[in-house]
Amino acid sequence: MGKIAFLFSGQGHQSPGLLSLFDGMEKAQELRRDAIQSQALSPELVKYLEDPDADSRRICHNLFAQQWICLFHQMAWASIGKNIDSPILLAGYSIGQLGASAASGAISPLDALLMSRLRAEFMDEVKPEGRMAAVLGLDFETLSGLCMRHGASIAICVDKTHFTIGAPEHNMESFISACRPLAREIVPLNISVASHIPMMKTAMGKFSASIENLGIKNPEIPVLSGINGKKMWRGSEVRNDLLSQISNTVRWDFCMRALIEEDCSVFFEIGPGSDLSRMIHRQFPAMPARSLCEFSNAESALNWIRQVNIH
């Protein structure tokens, strides 16, 4: 029986209806109540959670998205991860790194929610506004050259020919125009800030100062660094990783390689969405890999993990 890899997703597929996955899961509902009462979440998000149908588009706004995803991660982990006895390895994609770090025990759930709020607020303050796009079909060197010439940056390395690019809004159009004849596919992303690129250094500095007094402990469960894919065992490593990835390239390709090298035999994507589990399927078709969002509720997902990990 190998390790179970839990993958914490980033922005792009959040939907208010997904919280119904945790209906009847008492630990998840208790965490949600605590989050609202503690004021870790912004008043705007608390109001949104009370009536998400009033303006369903707000969940795509950065401040709402980062907090909501972090809450989703905490509720999912309370429902599923804490009920698994097998060896576990954690990895987070973008804002998912905060969820993975909280699941590791390095950060309390409420501190993680507060950090998601602060992270989003400081990123929203950065001007000019940025945009992000997925680029498929180009190698790292070719794409790096295009980025340099058009004021863009590689935000996430997904694999050898799949990248996420970030740029100030006024640079993204020229970058896409130059890239389109060369790339197999370019997909503008529904994300309202350009994270993991140098223009976010001021946000990183403010975030660093704001979390100075928050307790970040040594992880109880190993979690991979989003910057280099190595296992982190010290609270100081977790803190530095959460800070660094705000304005530096996320190396998800390194994380994928590490998960295989660490003998993970079951891959479960916390969500929202199923992009990360599909990546596993494409590269390692024989590996069991599913997302929470494929199930009708969290209990069914937990049962699948237990059953597939026995064989």
Image: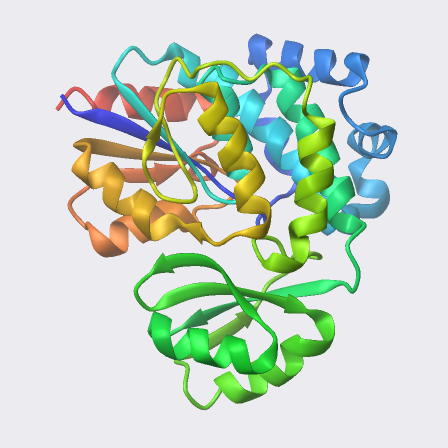
Residue that appears at 51% across and 15% down: 78
On screen, residue 174 above or below 190: below
Rendering coords of residue 188 (x, y %): 59, 69
Residue 15 is left or right of residue 153, and the answer is: right
- The relative height of residue 119 versus residue 27 in the rendered view (above or below) is below
Residue depicted at 72% across the width and 17% down the height: 35
Specify whether 181 is left or right of 194. Answer: left
Q: In which quarter of the image is the C terminus?
A: top left
Residue 167: give x, y in percent of width and height. 63, 68
Does residue 137 appear anywhere in the picture? Answer: no
Position in image of residue 79 (x %, y %) = 49, 16
Q: Can residue 113 be seen in this view?
A: yes
Q: Left of 280 or right of it: where is 252?
A: right
Q: Quadrant of the N terminus?
A: top left
Count of marks overlaid on the render: 0
Picture colour scheme: rainbow
Q: Is residue 139 left or right of residue 192?
A: left
Q: Work out whether residue 226 or residue 60 is closer to the camera in this orientation and state it.
A: 226
Report x, y in % for residue 222: 34, 22
Taking the view exactly as shown, the residue that stands out farthest to the bottom is 181
Q: Which of the pair 203/135 is nearer the observer?
A: 203
Is 193 above or below relative to 95? Answer: below
Q: In which quarter of the image is residue 118?
A: top right
